[in-house]
Image: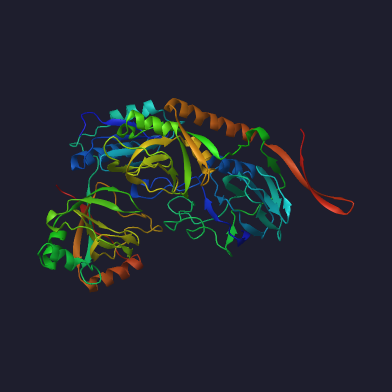
Amino acid sequence: MYKIPRILPAGDKAVVVEYGNEISEECNKKVLNLYNALMKRDITGIVSMIPTYRSLLIKYEPLRITVDNLAALIAKCDTSTSVEEFKPKIIEIPVAYGGDFGPDLDYVAKYHDMTPEEVIKIHTESAYRIYMLGFTMGFAYLGGMSEKIATPRLEKPRTEIPAGSVGIAGSQTGIYPIASPGGWRLIGKTPVKLYDPYREKPILLEAGNYIKFVRITPDEFYEIERQVSTCAYEVKIYDYNV
Amino acid sequence: MECFKVINPGLFTSVQDMGRFGYERQGVPVSGVMDEFSFRVANMLVGNAENTPALEITLLGPTLEVLQDTVVAVTGAWMRPVVDGREMPCWSSFPVRKGETLSFAPVKAGCRAYMAVLGGFAGDTVMGSVSTYTRGGIGGVKGRRLEKGDILSREGDEFFAHFFKVREEYIPHYSSEEEIRIILGPQHDYFSRESLELFLNSTYTITKDADRMGYRLDGPEIKAKEKHDIITDGILPGAVQIPGNGKPIIMLKDAQTTGGYAKIATVVSTDLSKLAQLKPGDRINFRAISLQEAHQLLQKMEYVLDDIRKTLVPSRYFDVTVDGTVYNVNIELLK
C-alpha cells in the first residue's frame, strides 16, 4: 500500500484514486471506504464510480465540478479502515454440487487426492470477499478460496457454460452470471439469478459484501429454480461479523 | 406510436441514447452513442431533448417504410437520406409521409450517422437507458441491432411543419486521417520515454477489429518497461490499452468496465465523436494535451452546441411542378 494514495488522470472526465499495487483486503477496504463515503455525500458532478481491487475510478462532469475540488473532497474523506461506513453483508448462494450441475467436481477431487465430499466441504466452509465486479455483467471477483482446492483451468475452454455455474480457476472461485464460453472447472450450479436486467435490483452482488456457498440437493435446486422463476425466492442476506 | 417498418436493417443499426450510467461498478458497460456531438444535434433539429433515443447507423443505412407522418433529422456520417428517390439534406430536419420509403445513399465520409425522430424512438429501458448493448442483449429493440420486419415506434404522436438546418460552418468535415487528442495515463509510467515518443509520433491504422466495443490499431509496437499486465482496474470509453503484443486498443462505448492491460493514455471526451467517424483502414495520430486544455475543449463544444441551437436556420419543403416535372424544393426562410 502507498503511504499517500495516488490520484491518476484517466482522460478529462475521470480520475483514478489508487491505494496500492497489490490485491489485499486492506487495500480493497480503503477503495470501498472512499467509494461509500463519496456515495453517501452524493456529490454534484460525480457521474459514477468503479471500485476495483486497489483503486477507485471516479467519473465526473468537469463542467459541474473542478478536478481540484474533487481532489480536495477525496482528501477529506476518511478511508481509515477503522471507520467502516459500510456494513458488509453475507449473501447466501445455494449450490447443487457435482453431477450435471458440476461436471468437473470429480476431476477437482481426483486432482487433490480427495473425495468430492471433501471438496464441497472446503468450498462451503469460508465466506468469500467480493473484491470487485467486472469482466462481464454481474461477475464478482472473489477472494478467500482455500489453496487446498486450487485447480488449473481447462486446457480447452467450453464453448457454452450455463448461467449460474460455479467454478474454480487457479486459486479463484466464481459464478457465471450469464451463459458464456469459459475455461473454469465447474463444480456446481446455483438456481439464483445473479443478473436479471428486469429485476428492481438487476445485479445481486456488490463489492465489499461476502458470499457463502450453501450446499443444496438436486430437488432443492429445482424447487428454488421454480421459486426464482415466479419471483417468490428471497436470497438470504445477513450481517457479516468479523 | 408506430412510425417505421424496417425493410432492410443496413449493416448495423441500433437505438442509442447517451448511455447507461450507475451500473458500471457491477460490470455493465455504458454503451450509448459513439458520436455524442452528432447525436445531440440530430435531436436538436427535431426539437427533442438532447438525450432522446435515436438510431445509430453504421456505414450502410437502413431502408424504412414510413407508417405515419413525422419529422426526422440525419446528422453525422455523410450518407444522404433518400425519400422515395428524392435526396434530402444532411444536418437538417425534414418531413416524411405515411407510405413513403426512407433510405440512405452510400456513405461519402465518416462512419456513423444519427437519425432522430420527433418525440424520440421508443425502446426497452433497461437500468435507466434505452441504449442497445448487443453483447448483453439489453436495450433498444429486443437488445439487438435492427432486423428486417421490426416495427419502430416513437414517443408521442404530434406532428409539426417546422424544419431546420444547421449552418454550414458548424457541420464537421470527416477525413480518413485524424489527430486524436489524449491525456497520458493512468499507467503511462509503465512505458519508457522512448516508447511514449514512439506512441505519440507514429501513425496508427484502424484494423478490421473495430466496433462499438473498441478499435484495435496497427502500427509500431509499444513495449512496456517491464510488464503489460496490471492488477485489473476500471476502464472507461477512450482508454488506450497496450496489451503484450504492443498494439494499442482504444476501448469504446460497449467496452467491459474493467481490464488488466496497462492504459498508456485516454482519449479526451470531445474527440470520441471524431473517433466514431473513423472506419477500418483510416489512420490516427495521437497528440498529448493537458487536462486544462481538454476541459477548455469540452467547454468550447458546449458553446458550439449552444450556438448551433441558436442559429438553426428555419426551412420549408415544397413540391413544385415545372413543365410537368415535380421538384422537391428546400427553402431557407430569411428573417
* Percent coordinates x, y for residue A102 in the rendering: 23, 67
* Color theme of the render: rainbow
Mark yes or no: residue B311 visible: no
Above or below, comparing residue B99 to residue B118 in the picture = below
Please identify the residue farthest to the right as the structure is shown.
Answer: B323
* Percent coordinates x, y for residue A99 in the rendering: 22, 72
Above or below, comparing residue B18 to residue B147 in the picture = above
Q: Nearer the viewer, residue A203 or B260?
A: B260
B102 sits left or right of B26 in the view = right
* Percent coordinates x, y for residue B255 in the rendering: 41, 48
Tell me which corner region of the image, top left, top right, bottom left or bottom right, holds residue A54.
top left
Please identify the residue farthest to the bottom as the structure is shown.
Answer: A219
Please identify the residue farthest to the left as the structure is shown.
Answer: A113
Q: Nearer the viewer, residue B208 or A109?
A: B208
Tell me which corner region of the image, top left, top right, bottom left or bottom right, holds residue B37.
top right
Quadrant including the N terminus of chain A? top left
Count all numbered tags in the image, as a single digit. Answer: 0
* Percent coordinates x, y for residue B113 in the rendering: 59, 47
The residue sitting at 60% across, 40% down in the picture is B41
Q: Nearer the viewer, residue A23 or A191?
A: A23
A28 sits left or right of A122 in the view = right
Mark yes or no: residue A13 visible: yes
B84 sits left or right of A207 in the view = right
B104 sits left or right of B273 in the view = right
